[in-house]
Amino acid sequence: MGQPSMDRCDIVIVGGGLAGGLAVLALAAKRPDLDVRLVEPGPVGGNHVWSFFDSDIAKRDRWLVAPLVRHHWPRYDVRFPGHVRTLRMGYKSITGEALAKAVAAALPEGQVIADKAKHLAPDHVLLARGGRLSAKHVIDARGAGKFPTLNCGWQKFVGQALTVKGGHGVEHPVVMDAAVEQLDGYRFVYLLPFDAETIFVEDTYYSDESDLDVSVIRERIASYAVSQGWEVAATGREETGVLAVVIAGEFDRLWPVSDRTARIGARAGMFHATTGYSLPDAVRTAVALPALAGRADLPERLRDRAAAAWRRQRFYRMLGAMLFRAAEPDERYRIFQRFYRLSPGLIARFYAGRSLATDKLRILSGKPPVPVGRAIAALRRFDWK
């Protein structure tokens, strides 16, 4: 067998974030016969921590992420002004560094191309530093972008790993600490105890605007640490992000039929419309990709999967409309406070994007945690596509 061509391959994946990295790992594991390249200008995985509930991923698919898990806990807490609860549900975290290490081990040397793609077509990529890489299939995994064709609210955050002198005393994750001052929409603090002295603190907002003032949020994280009685000895990794919370929009405008370049991940609209999280969909797509990789109609198949996922997200887009159009910004926490009084199974299926019809009815039943008139008005204006 001859040496692989440096300018031609079977599949080139553009974007080395979560979706692109997992796709590489799945193809390397299940289709080692394929010549796969990854184009990513920055570090693969970036500076990210991705967390998920055990129930987010089907047991048959966990082989893909199990080697990447760096932290795990058997339960988590939520805190609201009127409700505190511990849920006995497995919770895990993987890091960008773990993803980068796995990708480097999976692909032969030289098949991770540290460059930016300046143009994508279904069968080739033009690189910013010059050169053309041809492939049977190009897969766009470059992330979400701004989504100008969609009606969105925003989940935005700044997270820092703090080293606390003498220990922080937090035993398991706090997925939402909303017993904090409500600012810029629904605000909560997210806590991941990495070890006895290291805790990742993320200050998060469900906001009408996507603007993120990192310096202000850093000050709020410092104030939160003081309120917990922590003496911070050092600040480690810092992560920032702005995720779309989709309220309405047509899939055909997000991914036009005329665009025949394959997409995966947030670029394909494959994320939870209420939470903005993409890991469960990224795993499902990556696991399905090896069986599709040899098909001439790969782009059409991936688009059909993304369109079907978009239709399944309609209920969650409706919840986003309720959150951003019916609730006053400083009262939005009441929606989540009520939600976290529901059954653990319902909560788990919600985060996995697999809510049953009975779950949806239960979420919407009873006295709404927002003014009734505004709730009805929000539903009447909702785009049901």
Image: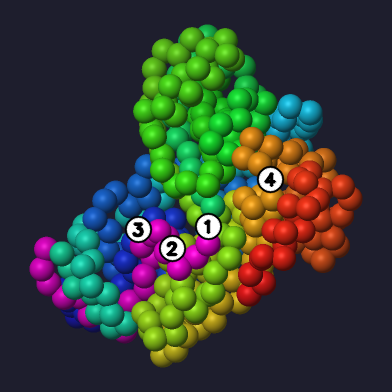
Crowdedness near tag 2: few (<14), some (14–19) or many (≥20) residues, C-alpha within 10 Å: some
Q: Are marks 1 and 3 in contact (CB under 8 Å)?
A: no
Contact flag, marks 3 and 4 (Cβ < 8 Å): no
Residue assigned mark 3: 16
The percent position of residue 369, horizontal first and vertical second, equals: 79, 44
The amino acid type of the residue labelled 2 equals Phe
Q: Residue at x 75, y 49 (%)?
A: 347
Q: Nearer the viewer, mark 1 or mark 3?
A: 1
Contact flag, marks 4 and 2 (Cβ < 8 Å): no
**Mark 3–mark 2 distance (CA, rounded to whole Å):** 20 Å
In the displayed structure, 83 sits above or below 294; it is: above
* Residue for point 24% across, 79% down: 124
Of pointers 2 and 1, the one earlier in the residue sequence: 2
Give how far apart the Cα atoms at labels 1 and 4 are. 15 Å
Tell me which numbered mark, 4 or 2, is placed earlier along the sequence.
2
Q: Is residue 65 left or right of residue 103?
A: right
Q: CA distance from mark 3 to mark 4?
A: 37 Å
Q: Nearer the viewer, mark 3 or mark 4?
A: 4
The answer to which of marks 3 and 4 sits earlier in the sequence is 3
Residue range highlighted in magenta: 129-151
Decide: is 385 above or below 21: below
> For mark 4, what is the residue?
327
Amino acid type at mark 3? Gly
- Mark 2 — residue? 147
Q: Secondary structure at mark 2?
A: loop
Q: Amino acid at mark 1?
A: Cys
Q: Position of residue 381 (x, y in %)?
A: 67, 65
Identified at 70% across, 33% down, the residue is 78
In the image, residue 296 above or below residue 267: below
